[in-house]
Amino acid sequence: MSQKAALRRELLAARRLLTQDDVGRTAAVLSASAQNLPELTEARTVAAYVSVGREPGTHALLDALRARGVRVLLPVLMEDNDLDWALFEGAEHLVPAGRGLLEPDGARLGPRAVLDADAVLLPGLAVDGRGMRLGRGGGSYDRVLARLSSAGAHPALVVLLYDDEVVARVPEEPHDHPVDAVVTPAGARRFPSRAS
Ligand SMILES: Nc1nc2c(c(=O)[nH]1)N(C=O)[C@@H](CNc1ccc(C(=O)N[C@@H](CCC(=O)O)C(=O)O)cc1)CN2
Ligand SMILES: Nc1ncnc2c1ncn2[C@@H]1O[C@H](COP(=O)(O)OP(=O)(O)OP(=O)(O)O)[C@@H](O)[C@H]1O
């Protein structure tokens, strides 16, 4: 098993020990602390995602951003694991999709819609002190980050995690791009800015 796969397995096993109560309580704290991040408060368009299962909860944050008039884009998983995007128009417009996901039911805006984002909230399983992120392994966000970078777009990249998911080192590959900040229940932490 690759180092990434082993770390992913370990972190997913730890998340499985969380109760829905743990997830709910943490979601409220995360939402409050994410809303104080200038990267999010100053954004007009945020590309986010709908948390499912034991992922750090994003629902309260999505509602708060939308209530403030922020344009919130949500991912729609395509067959090749790349991501299309659609507007978040409220929880009543989220529908069950494959792999236990909830997706927006509105018009698909195309994979390049993410280039409008001032901030991107990425799912992840871990991040290290350099900002290197471990994702689920589908490579969806690797593609999003490659697309942003080749278009010369530099939105703030923010990942939401539980405290013990900020780890000493995430094994990296050449295609990996670091994120700018992590928000955990303990607070926000910024990483050194990217050189580009
Ligand atoms: N909430 C959320 N939305 C997201 C992602 C994510 O990580 N979280 N994605 C990030 O790229 C994309 C979807 N990619 C995914 C890739 C793999 C699996 C997955 O392995 N699912 C398990 C079941 C869920 C679980 O319990 O972990 C499976 O299919 O067995 C899910 C989503 C876009 N939307
Ligand atoms: N720009 C890209 N285009 C297509 N495939 C890519 C790209 N970048 C990475 N991949 C592929 O995606 C797969 C998953 O990569 P990796 O294990 O780094 O995922 P991850 O970063 O943990 O997950 P995610 O990006 O979904 O959050 C690898 O097979 C990798 O080769």
Image: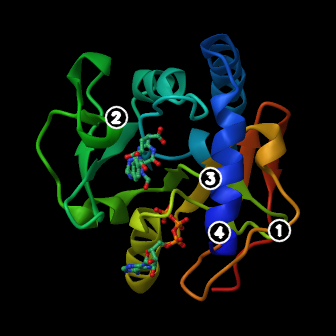
Query: Residue most toward the front?
Result: 1
Which corner quadrant of the image does residue 112 belong to? Answer: bottom left
Tell which tag, 4 or 3, sits nearer the viewer.
4
- Residue 169: which disc? 1
User: Between marks 4 and 3, how big is the CA–CA gap?
Assistant: 20 Å
Task: Identify residue for label 2.
Answer: 100
Residue 142, given in percent of the width and then of the height, sits at 47, 71
Q: Classify mark 4 as within 8 Å of ligand 2 or not, answering yes or no.
A: yes
Query: Residue most toward the left?
Result: 107
User: Between marks 3 and 2, how big is the CA–CA gap?
Assistant: 23 Å
Amino acid on which disc 3 is placed: Val
Identify the residue shown where x is 60% and y is 15%.
20
User: Between marks 2 and 4, how big is the CA–CA gap?
Assistant: 22 Å
User: Between marks 4 and 1, how big is the CA–CA gap?
Assistant: 11 Å
Task: Identify residue for label 3.
Answer: 158
**Residue density around tag 1, few if under 14, some if 14–19, many if 20 or more, within 10 Å:** some
Q: Is residue 118 left or right of residue 158?
A: left
Q: Earlier in the sequence, mark 3 or mark 2?
A: 2
- Under circle 4, the secondary element is helix
Residue 61, given in percent of the width and then of the height, sits at 53, 27
Tell which tag, 1 or 3, sits nearer the viewer.
1
**CB contact under 8 Å: marks 4 and 3:** no
**CB contact under 8 Å: marks 1 and 2:** no
